Structure formats: structure tokens, C-alpha cells
């Protein structure tokens, strides 16, 4: 397991309890993470992960007697959400149904960071941009796009459509991309 994967797994385990984080009897952060459920990691991976959690300021820790408390910072919560967004996928059926799925959006300049994230994730999901803010996919993808839009807080700025017929120029661009 890579350090990045171990960090993301650590964030998931700590984040399971929401804002309460993890409280356990431990003498150190690695011991607390082992107690919380990271007991299958090699010691070297666990050591690198805990160092990264601290270096990137993804967690806050405190000790009260024998109890060690580990909690996500705001930055840690965002990192956890970002790792969760990477789990969104578009399932490809065995056969194409002949419909094109279109996503278009008009996002205000004040939300440009969310727009960039949304566009990058559309690309990762296999969408093809035909025009500025107009993306196409050949497989059913509304659920994935809506989940992504919810994460980016762009639900009111997107439009989804299923299209049965396209002009020849757009169709050639799509065929070249898929």
C-alpha cells in the first residue's frame, strides 16, 4: 500500500465517527491508528502515513491521561471528501443503447474552483467536451454526475439530457473520441 492510500485509509477510519474523531487508549498516533483499525498496515507504511497526516495538517491530536484523541481538521475533511469523489464511476453496460448523455453548465465566476474540479472529474469519468461547458458520454451517467455536482455544490448550475440524435459534425467528434 502506498503512503497516499494509507493516508486516505487513515482519514476514512478517523472520519467514520464524524466530528468526534477517534478516542482510544494509546501512547502515540501510530498506536491509536492501530487500535482504530489500521492493524494490517506494515509498520513502515504506518509510520509514513502518520508523518504525512501531521505534515499536511490533516489531523489534530490530543492526549488526556491514557486516552489519545485524533480528529480531522477542516483540511482533513476536504481531503477525505476528495478521496471519496474519486470513487464515483460510470458503469458501462455490455451494449450501447444509442443515447448520448449531455452535461452542460453555467457556473458563476465566484465558483471557478468548483467548476475546475467538476470539469476535471467529468473528464476522469470519460466525458468528452464538445464545446465550452458542454460534455457528452455514451453510457447512463446521471447518478454519477448528480453525485459529483452535489459534492461541488453546483446542482443548480448544471443541465443533464439524454439525446437520441446529433448533428453530423458533433457526431464525428464524439466518434473520434470514443
Image (spheres, rainbow, N blue to C red):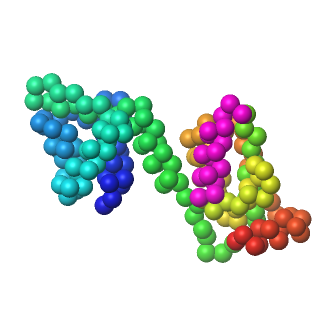
Q: Which quadrant of the figure has residue 14?
A: top left
The location of residue 41, given as percent across then percent down, is 22, 56
Residue 69 placement, left or right of 159: left
Q: Position of residue 154 (x, y in %)?
A: 65, 38
Q: Residue at x 88, y 67 (%)?
A: 169
Quadrant of the drawing holding the C terminus: bottom right
160 left or right of 14 in image? right
Main SS of the magenta segment?
Answer: helix
Left or right relative to 8: residue 112: right
Q: Residue at x 15, y 43 (%)?
A: 31
Provide residue 139's location: percent of width, then percent of height.
Answer: 67, 64
Considering depth in this image, is 95 or 108 the residue closer to the camera?
A: 108
Q: Residue furthest front?
A: 55
Q: Is residue 15 visible?
A: no
Whether residue 46 sits left or right of residue 15 in the image: it is left
Percent across and percent down for residue 104 are: 76, 48
> In the image, what residue occupies the spot 35% across and 45% down?
12
Span shown in magenta:
109-124
Q: Residue furthest bottom?
A: 95
> What residue do we see at 48% from left, 45% from top?
82
Above/below status of 68 relative to 168 = above
Residue 107, picture quadrant: top right
Residue closer to the observer: 23 or 46:
46
In the image, is residue 97 above or below residue 106? below
Asked if residue 48 shows in the view, the reply is yes
Magenta includes 119? yes
Amino acid at each position: 500500500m502506498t503512503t497516499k492510500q494509507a493516508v486516505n485509509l487513515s482519514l476514512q477510519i478517523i472520519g467514520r465517527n464524524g466530528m468526534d474523531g477517534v478516542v482510544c487508549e494509546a501512547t502515540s498516533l501510530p498506536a491509536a491508528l492501530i487500535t482504530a483499525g489500521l492493524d494490517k498496515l506494515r509498520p513502515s507504511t504506518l509510520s509514513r502515513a502518520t508523518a504525512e497526516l501531521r505534515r499536511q495538517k490533516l489531523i489534530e491530536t490530543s492526549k488526556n491521561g491514557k486516552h489519545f484523541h485524533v480528529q480531522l481538521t477542516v483540511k482533513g475533511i476536504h481531503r477525505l471528501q476528495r478521496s471519496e469523489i474519486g470513487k464515483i464511476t460510470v458503469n458501462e453496460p455490455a451494449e450501447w443503447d444509442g443515447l448520448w448523455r449531455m452535461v452542460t453548465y453555467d457556473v458563476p465566476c465566484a465558483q471557478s474552483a468548483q467548476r475546475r474540479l467538476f470539469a476535471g472529474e467529468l473528464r476522469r469519468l470519460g466525458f468528452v467536451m464538445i464545446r465550452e461547458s458542454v460534455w457528452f458520454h455514451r453510457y447512463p451517467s446521471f447518478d454519477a454526475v448528480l453525485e459529483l455536482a452535489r459534492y461541488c455544490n453546483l446542482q443548480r448550475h448544471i443541465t443533464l439530457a439524454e439525446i437520441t440524435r446529433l448533428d453530423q459534425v458533433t457526431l464525428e467528434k464524439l466518434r473520434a473520441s470514443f
